[in-house]
Amino acid sequence: ISACEKSRKWEKALQLLSSMSHHEVESNMIVFNAAISACEKDAQWEKALQLFDAMTKSGVESDRITFNAVISACGKGGECDKALQIFGEMAQSGVELGTISFNAAISACEKAGKWEKALQLLRVLAHSKVE
């Protein structure tokens, strides 16, 4: 699945993930993250959100990589509000926000022309102890 991500073959990544469940192979955070990242690379924000939802429903824990990929996928797909919603969920879930998290959210705002929200996020980033 990670090779599919790197070669921008998100559909194949989803096929492999699906075949894992059909063969009763358990998916974990690494597998889901690779599939979500594959979708993110091609701005398949709806698929990334579906995987994120499936991940949560199956009890697989999300990490910073998961959230960053979903936020970025939404941003690339022009879904700024959804990206900001996921960013907020990340903060509320206790997963530590990082520079990449802020960059993905700011980029989503930039693509949507929401410069005021982007500036607000930049101010929060400047006053936080984010790594």
Image (cartoon, grey):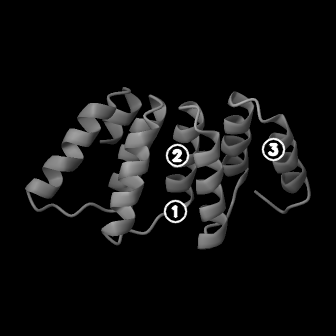
Q: What's the CA distance linking mark 1 and mark 2? A: 10 Å
Left or right, residue 74 beside residue 35? right
Mark linked to residue 90:
none
- Is residue 100 placed above or below 60 in the rendered structure? above
- Please identify the quarter of the rendering in which residue 103 is found: top right
Indicate the position of residue 108 as horizontal and vertical percent values: 67, 37
Indicate the position of residue 84 as horizontal and vertical percent values: 66, 50
Name the residue at 81% across, 41% down. 118
The number of callouts visible is: 3
Counting residues from the start of the chain, the first of labels 1 and 2 encountered is: 1
Q: What's the CA distance linking mark 3 and mark 2? A: 20 Å
Q: Name the residue that disc number 2 marks.
A: 69
Classify the position of the C terminus by image quarter: bottom right
Which structural element holds mark 2?
helix
Q: Nearer the viewer, residue 86 or 29?
A: 86
Indicate the position of residue 21 as horizontal and vertical percent values: 15, 57
Q: Name the residue that disc number 1 marks.
A: 63
Q: Nearer the viewer, residue 112 or 130?
A: 112
Left or right, residue 82 beside residue 32? right
